[in-house]
Image (cartoon, rainbow, N blue to C red):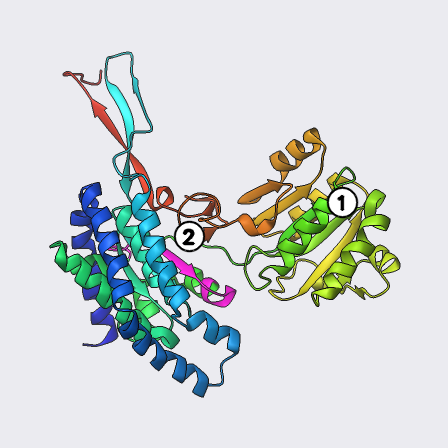
Amino acid sequence: MDVKTLIADMAVRARKSSREVANLPTQTKNRLLLNTADMIVSRKAQLQKENEKDLENARQKGLSDAFIDRLALSDKVIDSMARGLREVAALPDPVGEVPGMWIRPNGLQVGRVRIPLGVIGMIYESRPNVTIDAAGLCLKAGNAIILKGGSDAINSNLALAAVIQDALSELSITGDAVQVIPTTDRSAVTELLKREEEIDLIIPRGGEGLIRFVVENSSIPVLKHYKGVCHVYVDRFADLDMAKNICFNSKVQRPGVCNAMEGMLVHSEVADEFLPAMAAEFNKAGVEMRGCPRTCAIVPDAVPAKDEDWGEEFLALILCVKVVDSMQEAMDYIARYGSNHTEAIVTRDYARSRKFMSEVDASLVLTNASTRFNDGGQLGLGAEIGISTSKLHAYGPMGLQELTTTKFIGYGSGQIRE
């Protein structure tokens, strides 16, 4: 079967299966997730055997240790996948929730009810654990899903798909509800993006290049974020010890992720005290500070920032530092260079924190907390399928509720429109 025919067939089957999955009882969906979690653990050796094929291919290609680490289905990763499924099973089912009802003057009772989106197309890169995370969330929210992982993880993804298929079969649920595209042919992505009649939403998860390719070539709505250029603003009224801990965590705890701090803004009234102490901590961790002229005057070891550094997503132990004279200047900077991902202020002034949180446009705005909290699990969603920095129809981490929409319902007693 050629790639075009393969994708068309998978999409048609996913659309058909979506009607069944949308109407599964909550108890059945939860049992499916719990069974899948148990199978993942019991088949750990088999999964790791298939994963080793991908790891060996990656080593032969000379891929980085960081890439290989993301690719590996270690004991910790497998246990984490199983735990994630159990956590999603424990979450309230959003499907069927009625956010509100009201009665019109003619007596017609109108309301909204939460329903699944339908069929999700997920395109992602090296992490095979996304196969399980995405499938679990989509199934709990009543959606069918077609998964296209990176070619480097093909053996791992197919092995994980086999586990899900067996779990579906045990409960007599169609296996078409979760499908992994079984080819590394790049044209499969392009063909998937054409299936607007069967697929309701595309979610790309990976580097900026992948996401831009998907957006430019998709005839289906895409939920996305291109990059995470996140900032922490240290206000004139900040607790500086708290600010130091927050900035260090935001940058150093995991620098290669989208919610890591890439820019640090410091009010001029506290810069002389805060920056040398902060620089000392960053220096111990190997962080390179690229600063404005005022930053470099206070921290001689800082590297003068170039024009292209401002607004850059480094994904490394590098960050830009700018001294500002007001909170308004900090917010203007964020409006220009931020990516609508995550922004934070450190301050003891309630009114200023409220102004910052009201006026700064990002999917998560924080007061006195690390940018690293922009994550579905950390925000109490149980898990996430991705983070959206567009506003239609979700903004921020996408959990179960973001994988649903609402339709109107109406209860009448014979009303007709005059």
Residue on which the image places disc 1: 240
Sequence-first tag of 2 and 1: 2
Q: Amino acid at mark 2?
A: Leu
Compared with residue 334, is residue 299 higher up or lower down, i.e. above or below? below
Label of residue 223 in the image: 2
> Any magenta on residue 206?
yes
State which region is magenta.
Answer: 196-211
Q: Position of residue 404 (x, y in %)?
A: 32, 43
Mark pair 2, 1: CA separation: 37 Å
Compared with residue 41, is residue 28 higher up or lower down, i.e. above or below? above
> Any magenta on residue 138?
no
At a point 55% along the width and 44% down the height, the residue shown is 364
Residue 220: tell me if it is visible.
Answer: no
Q: Quadrant of the C terminus?
A: top left
Q: Position of residue 394 (x, y in %)?
A: 43, 44
Q: Is residue 110 left or right of residue 386?
A: left
| Secondary structure of residue under mark 2 | loop
Q: Nearer the viewer, residue 25 or 34?
A: 34
Q: Quadrant of the N terminus?
A: bottom left
